């Protein structure tokens, strides 16, 4: 471990994936990481030099208050160097079929939870001229069919990040958006399980309309665990954003994200429909199905 920096960093969603890797990378760089987890068993697995697990469900007001108190009452009066808003879930289903309670849950975790913890920790970040890193997604810029809720929450997180950056930049707080493409973590299998459950509850007419595209999206999600970059590689990008004195406003993670985001800037909506559709077609049963999504090919 490098020399202790006597600074705190809060990382949300640190039980697995990008959050766990980020907590470890930042601890390795000498920060004291308050690592948000939801279960004691995850806390026990994560605890180590420079990592202090904290029970933190970002949708629970009492947990938000507790982490703000933990930061404010740090026994060694260490400043809060950064907040990494990483916690997230993926709920994928067609707009028509996704129950409203699931829409709300998606936004509660991926957007309102991030806002709540940002509000709670902003006083400390203003004091320390700290950095907020919001983990968005390539889905915060380009939307696949069935990703309406997930991408909607990430588009909104991108917008809120832009507003916040323009509000607190002059006050010394840096706001950074990180946009990963495919990263090998738990999120793909968790998302597939959720999609599968939602499919089980769909009436026959909806299944007839959407099962083909859902199957293709799930096959594509499965492939992310082969083609994606490692959580450790993602953590290195986040650590760079945290430690830069003048970070960029946005960082992509992975070549897939960099290429897609660059290409999408030059395409019309119809052009992007076609790219998305052709890409998904590779994952449809038989590999060459018409896939009734995204307009005509
Ligand atoms: N992996 C990718 O390909 C990819 C691509 C683009 C963007 N991202 C984004 O990267 C971030 C991290 O995802 P990941 O890939 O590392 O997935 P992951 O392994 O599934 O990790 C998600 C983390 O979020 C936590 N979480 C879920 N609901 C929470 C809540 N209400 N309060 C606090 N924590 C909560 C989970 O905790 P539990 O274990 O307790 O559920 C877990 O620690 C997410 O924002 C995701 O949208 C990932």
Image (cartoon, rainbow, N blue to C red):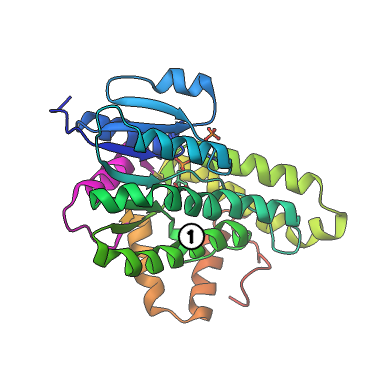
| Mark 1 secondary-structure assignment | helix
The outermost residue toward the left is 3
Q: Left of 282 or right of it: where is 159?
A: left
Which residues fall within the magenta stretch? 229-251
Residue 29 sits above or below residue 116 on the image: above
> Residue drawn 38% across and 20% down?
47
Task: Point out residue 133 in the picture as x, y percentages from the top left corner.
Answer: 34, 51
Residue 120 in view here: yes
Label 1 CB less than 8 angstroms from ligand 1: yes
Q: Quadrant of the C terminus?
A: bottom right
The image quadrant where one finds the N terminus is top left
Q: Residue at x 76, y 59 (%)?
A: 97
Q: Residue at x 48, y 66 (%)?
A: 142
Please state which of residues 132 and 80 is positioned toward the viewer in this rendering. 80
The image shows residue 208 at horizontal and vertical percentages of 81, 59
**From the viewer's perspective, is residue 78 above or below residue 246?**
above
Residue 175 lies in the magenta-colored region:
no
Given residues 143 and 284, the one toward you in this image is 143
Q: Residue 194 is drawn in which quadrant?
A: top right
Check disc 1 and report the residue beneath it: 139
Verify whether residue 244 appears in magenta: yes
């Amino acid at each position: 471990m490098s020399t202790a920096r006597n600074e705190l960093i809060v990382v949300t969603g640190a039980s697995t994936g990008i959050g766990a890797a980020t907590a470890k990378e930042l601890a390795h760089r000498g920060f004291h990481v308050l690592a948000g987890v939801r279960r004691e068993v995850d806390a026990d697995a994560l605890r180590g030099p420079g990592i202090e697990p904290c029970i933190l469900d970002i949708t629970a007001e009492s947990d938000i208050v507790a982490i703000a108190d933990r930061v404010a009452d740090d026994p060694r009066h260490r400043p809060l160097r950064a907040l990494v808003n990483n916690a997230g879930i993926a709920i994928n289903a067609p707009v028509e079929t996704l129950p409203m309670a699931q829409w709300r849950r998606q936004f509660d975790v991926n957007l309102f939870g991030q806002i709540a913890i940002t509000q709670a920790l902003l006083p400390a970040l203003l004091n320390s001229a700290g950095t907020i890193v919001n983990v968005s997604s390539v889905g915060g810029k380009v939307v696949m069919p069935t990703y309406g809720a997930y991408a909607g929450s990430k588009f909104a997180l991108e917008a809120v990040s832009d507003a916040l950056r323009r509000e607190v930049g002059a006050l010394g707080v840096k706001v950074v958006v990180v946009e990963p493409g495919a990263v090998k973590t738990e999120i793909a299998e968790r998302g597939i399980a959720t999609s599968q459950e939602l499919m089980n509850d769909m009436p026959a007419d909806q299944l007839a309309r959407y099962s083909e595209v859902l199957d293709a999206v799930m096959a594509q999600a499965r492939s992310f665990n082969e083609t994606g970059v490692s959580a450790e590689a993602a953590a290195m990008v986040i650590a760079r954003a945290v430690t830069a004195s003048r970070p960029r406003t946005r960082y992509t993670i992975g070549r897939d994200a960099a290429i897609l985001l660059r290409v999408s800037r030059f395409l019309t909506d119809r052009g992007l429909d076609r790219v998305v559709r052709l890409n998904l077609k590779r994952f449809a049963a038989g590999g060459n199905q018409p896939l009734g999504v995204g307009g005509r090919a």
